[in-house]
Amino acid sequence: MSLNATLDALFPTGHTVAVDRQVLTGTAETATGTVTVLGTTDAAAIDHRMALALAACVLDTVEQHPGRALVFLVDTSGQALSRGQELLCLNGSLAHLARCVDLARRQGHPSIALVTANAVSGGFLSFGLMADTAYALADAQVRVMDLRAMARVTKIAHERLVELAATSPIFAPGADSYVRMGAIEAIWPGPSAELLDNALADVADACAAGDQRQARGVARGGRQLAAGIVQSVVNSPALV
Amino acid sequence: METLEFRFDSKPASHAADPALCGVVGSGNLEILVKPGIEPGACAICIKTSARGFGETWQAVLGSFAASHAAGGTLIAINDMGATPAVVTLRLAQALAEYQGGAQ
Amino acid sequence: MIASLSARHSWFEATARARLAGLLDPGSFAEILPPVASQPSPHLARLDLPGAFDDGVVVCHGELEKMPIFAIAQEGQFMGGAVGEIHGAKIVGMLRRAAQEKPAAVLFLIDSGGVRLHEANAGLIAISEIMRAVLDTRAAGVPVIALVGGSCGAFGGMGIVAKLCSAIIISEEGRLALSGPEVIETVAGVEEFDSKDRALVWRVTGGKHRYLMGDCAQLVDDDIAAFRAGAADFLAGWQEPAPTPALLRTAQQSLENRLAAYGEMRDGLEVWAALGIADPSAVPLLDRDELVSLKEGLPT
């Protein structure tokens, strides 16, 4: 589905979203009010310019529109792979974007992320996974790395990875794995204003509750150890 | 990965300090955890190793160690990523020494 | 006081536990979830790999010059210091505990390539949780100081985490970046980044470059005592700022200015020249004290 079709389906009463070199920003009307819409399209490889453009958009919302929700549309192939980008510390610009999304949360702006097509690694970390709640469209590709590349790097046979991936979400690419592990709330069959409005209605609770992804990972069976380990570390006495 | 378990008679280790950890699980390296065991005159060892088929080598190296050191009364757990017998013996000695609070 | 060469203990060569032993006040180390109370990762076992009892990260209480601190130390020699489910959860737990108990600081000894591919999704989600936890701990008023100087540097998602910390203390051997040079070379070619050119790798991602650019607060010698002194000095003069729109807007402006000024450059030498350094080619040869003097003498 094209970006325009996705936007029209999410915001049937209108939006001002424009795209500048794979970065989309704008506003839209929803049942719960005006929202800031921002993100990336065309499997963008996130670089300094894009990260800073998104961060500026978040800061504009925080400075000018108290309480306004942020709707992130995520379509990224990960971070830009370039010497020039690393020279200027690309991890720093991604961290800055993450801090801005976190600031927005602290200032009372709820945030939702919707993976429209691709969500990979560092690109996903810097804004999609920083939102209060994340969703994905049914045919979205969510992953760290595809299994063939993973086989080359880990030196584990590709067939073995495929076999294990069938039963374990721990490394199996796909939005389903992320749902089971608590990082994605739900998969939408398609973009719809109704699903978005429901998500916006729910997100205020998520915003206030803190990071609940570990509890969800246990409840859904995909990530069975993390929540317990966190609790043990928080509660155990230190041993000399 | 192969899991191996052994038990050797050994002279009792002197009074135990806290459990002792030595080494890291890097390539060609291993970590050894020594803690109190049930039998004062024996040393029980469990190894998880990335290299398969070396059961006899482990038997020889560990047996030799248990015979020449006072390692009785311990439970030893090892995570191994392909260490040579020389490295294994060295780490065992380090771990046992630390377990006994620096005394040999 | 400069430690004599024979008394130096290399941070780069040391294990996580040895770094902690030299960093913390003697006798103050108190580990949480020690190896004797822990099991190796079942995810690695399923892939036929022996794990580590501590899953490659040590979390502990301790003191630094009598200040109560928490420390998190990644073991770079185990699976490239990479973050898996248990490893990540230990870090998140320690950061959350710090937000509650409010020690003087959290010292985060980062030595990691990022997500542990063997547990890819769990690692990515864990890093996302670590990112939020670092910001929560800082918002509670507790500084989180990254110490970078090991063989894995701070790469991938852990490179992002490092830049979320209150400050980074780095040695010349340390590296801080997002994608590894090998990955960039594989995808974009050797002309883009020759990963075997060590001098180039350090001019782009190494401690001296990051320090000169202002991405790291301190440059220290490759010596555990130097990291200890650097951390103590830094904390003595640091007040953790609350996250505000004004603070982040200032950071935004600074990053935009930097991109405009250096965005076309491809080598640290070009950046150092633009910073006002008269002889950029000498930078790799300067020792730590000379480089710090050089930086302090630069026009701002």
Image: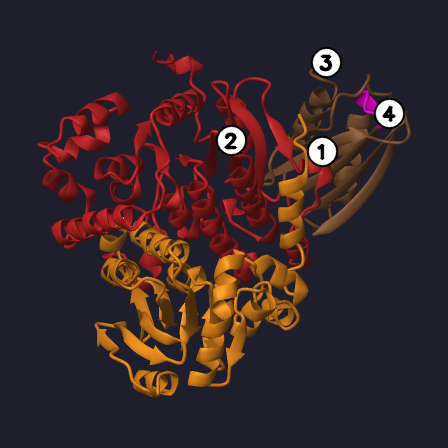
Q: Colour of chain A?
A: orange
Amino acid type at image mark 1:
Leu
Amino acid type at image mark 3:
Ala
Query: Disc 4 vs disc 3: which is toward the camera?
Result: 3
Tell me the distance, in whole angstroms, between the alpha carbons under discs 1 and 3: 17 Å
Image location of residue C245, percent across then percent down: 29, 51
Query: Disc 4 vs disc 2: which is toward the camera?
Result: 2
Q: Any idea which chain is the brown one in this picture?
A: B
Q: Earlier in the sequence, mark 4 or mark 3?
A: 4
Subunit bearing disc 3: B
Tell me the distance, in whole angstroms, between the alpha carbons under discs 4 and 2: 45 Å
Q: Which residue is mark 4?
A: B10
Q: Earlier in the sequence, mark 1 or mark 4?
A: 4
Q: Which residue is mark 3?
A: B103
Q: Earlier in the sequence, mark 1 or mark 3?
A: 1
Q: For the residues labelled 1 and 3, say whether their Cβ atoms are less than 8 Å apart.
A: no
Tell me the distance, in whole angstroms, between the alpha carbons under discs 4 and 3: 17 Å
Q: Are discs 4 and 3 located on one and the same chain?
A: yes
- Residues packed near mark 3 inside 10 Å, few (<14), some (14 to 19) or many (20 plus): few
Q: Is residue C174 visible?
A: yes
Q: Is residue A1 magenta?
A: no
Amino acid type at image mark 2:
Pro
Q: Which residue is mark 1?
A: B33
Tell me the distance, in whole angstroms, between the alpha carbons under discs 1 and 4: 17 Å
* Most foreground residue, A66 or C228: A66
Magenta stretch bounds: B67-73
Q: Which mark is residue C103?
A: 2
